[in-house]
């Protein structure tokens, strides 16, 4: 049986290593538009809205498009709902309640500018991106080392950010991985609201579970 008709061949990962030259890769305008980020309050692990996280060369990236230090990546989405889903999407996908600790103490902030300077934004969602080996697997493949190498290549080729389809949102939602030096910025935030408020508006159930019974599936769950 030829590889074209072999179902095993079709099930293999198609996304390959990034090419060295991404000249002509599709891009989007860098004009102002509202972007949203779900994050912990200042002082938490994220260190605020404008936190760029990186990873060591011998470490595993925590985020899909994390760059190697001293560079970093900040993740945003084109709607508050898409930003929230990237935080709690695993619970939503399993149609489970969301633990309160995943919601409380977190904010959804709105920003107007991505601060890419004169660097263009790479558009993975463009149909023309396929010419460089782009597939939707970039948003879903669990190999973060591979997706991080794509981010490294895009950053190295002079792009300031990457627009892509977020993993936990369907429809026409998009997200952006913004590149810059690792660390926190003090750039302006248009507004912020509690993540719980956004989650409740989305109709998602939040469950308050005592820490002593977090792993006990038979424990009584109080939805709030």
Image (cartoon, rainbow, N blue to C red):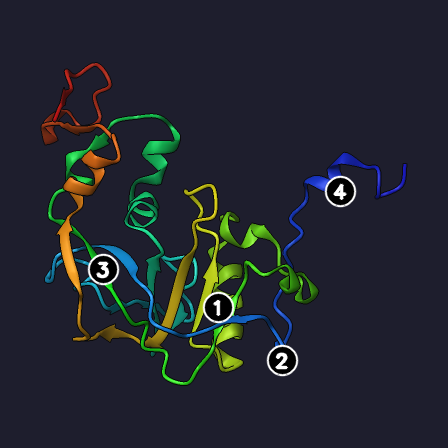
Give the CA separation, mark 3 to mark 1. Answer: 24 Å
Q: Position of residue 180 (x, y in %)?
A: 34, 77
Question: Where's the N terminus, which quadrant?
Answer: top right
Instruction: Name the mark on residue 110.
Output: 3
Where is 42 relative to 104, above or below? below
Which residue matches tag 1? 151
Q: Residue at x 35, y 47 (%)?
A: 82
Crowding at label 1, few (<14), some or many (≥20) Cα neighbours within 10 Å?
Answer: many
Question: Where's the C terminus, which quadrant?
Answer: top left
Give the CA separation, mark 4 to mark 2. Answer: 30 Å
Q: Residue at x 48, y 68 (%)?
A: 151
Instruction: Name the mark on residue 9.
Output: 4
Q: Can residue 69 be seen at all in this image of the molecule?
A: no
The nearer-to-camera label among 3 and 1 is: 3
Q: Position of residue 142 (x, y in %)?
A: 49, 48
Q: Mark 1 or mark 3, which is nearer the start of the sequence?
A: 3
Secondary structure at numbered mark 4: helix
Secondary structure at numbered mark 3: strand
The nearer-to-camera label among 1 and 2 is: 2
**Circles 3 and 1: CB atoms closer than 8 Å:** no
Instruction: Name the mark on residue 23.
Output: 2
């Amino acid at each position: 049986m030829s590889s074209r008709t072999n179902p095993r061949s079709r099930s293999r990962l198609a996304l390959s290593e990034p090419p060295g030259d991404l000249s002509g890769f599709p891009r989007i305008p860098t004009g102002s538009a509202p972007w949203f980020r779900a994050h912990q309050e200042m002082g938490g692990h994220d260190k605020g809205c404008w936190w760029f996280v990186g990873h060591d060369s011998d470490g595993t990236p925590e985020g899909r498009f994390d760059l190697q230090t001293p560079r970093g990546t900040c993740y945003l989405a084109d709607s508050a709902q898409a930003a929230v889903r990237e935080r709690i999407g695993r619970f939503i996908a399993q149609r489970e309640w969301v633990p309160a600790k995943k919601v409380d103490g977190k904010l959804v902030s709105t920003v107007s500018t991505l601060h890419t300077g004169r660097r263009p934004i790479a558009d993975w969602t463009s149909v023309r991106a396929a010419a460089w080996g782009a597939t939707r697997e970039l948003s879903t493949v669990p190999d973060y080392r591979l997706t991080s190498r794509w981010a490294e290549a895009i950053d190295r080729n002079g792009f300031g950010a990457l627009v892509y389809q977020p993993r936990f949102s369907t429809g026409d939602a998009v997200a952006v991985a913004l590149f810059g030096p690792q660390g926190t910025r003090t750039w302006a935030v248009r507004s912020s609201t509690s993540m719980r408020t956004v989650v409740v508006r989305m109709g998602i159930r939040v469950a308050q579970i005592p820490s002593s019974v977090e792993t006990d599936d038979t424990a009584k769950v109080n939805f709030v």
